[in-house]
Image: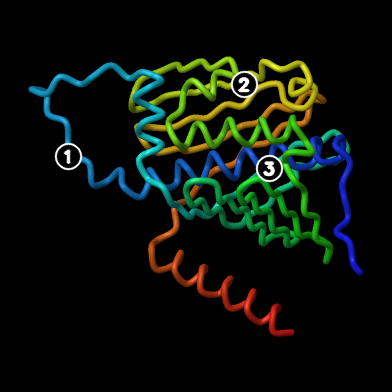
Amino acid sequence: MSTTPRMSTHLLSRRLIARVFAAIALVGGGAALSAIGTLAPVTPAQAAPAWTLDRLMATLAQHKTGRAAFTETRWLAIAAEPVESSGELAFAAPDHLEKNTLSPKPEHLVVDGDMLTVDRNNRKYTLALAHYPEVGAFIESIRATLTGNRYALEQTYKVALAGHGDDWTLTLTPLDSRMRKVVDTITLEGSRGELRSVAIQQAGGDHSLMKLRPLAATAASSTSSATAAKGSASTSG
């Protein structure tokens, strides 16, 4: 009888928390990106409401599914040069999240309900978030962002919004001392409902920057079909 390998809390935190956050946050923004062009133009006669945290969260939460391509650059103390990767992200409300890294090495990360699955180096790790309270709280706080639940978000982070609707910066600072041992700050930048980038500053000095490019509907559909076909083939085999 086979068993799924378990990763230690320390290893999970250091290697996966930042990746989980970027996947969730960026796909949420990618969904908003797909609809930004359909908004009616604002004329001088229209009084624009103040750009507040509540308005930002409501804008990002409008769309319940999304798919986008990403490019990520990580600066690591153990690497002489920046480490670059790319792939695709997907989100489906209320709690399904995916990050599929295609280059330079394949890695598939899925958060589905209370389960986190990581598939890399021909090994699959399945983790119950209930067994990792720090990680569970981290993920739930991001889900709160996508669903516009400001109260839940502020239970985990000090939240600061700067700028205006066309050029805003959202900075998240963990409140819990255990989380601060992993992540110092998370900075999201965007325009209206368009999320342009997510920067993560880790406690040990490592940091990363992820940029988003929305996938066209046809590309997303093709990717979904290919993924489903691969999964079906694996099951059959």
- Check whether the beta carbons of the residues at disc 2 and disc 1 lie within 8 A of each other: no
First-in-chain label (3 vs 2): 3
* Count of marks placed on residues: 3
Residue type pointed to by label 2: Thr
**Is the residue 131 above or below the residue 189 in the image?**
below
Q: Which of the two discs, 2 and 1, labels the residue nearer the N terminus? A: 1
Of circles 3 and 2, which is in front?
Answer: 2
Local SS, label 2: loop
The residue beneath circle 1 is 40
Closer to the N terminus: mark 1 or mark 3? 3
Q: Which residue is mark 3?
A: 19
Q: Residue at x 61, y 40 (%)?
A: 22
Residue matched to label 2: 156
Please give the name of the residue rendered at 61% of the width and 57% of the height, measured from the top-left corner: 87
Quadrant containing the C terminus in the rendered view: bottom right
Compare residues 136 and 100 and report the one nearer the observer: 136
What's the residue type where badge 1 is placed?
Ala
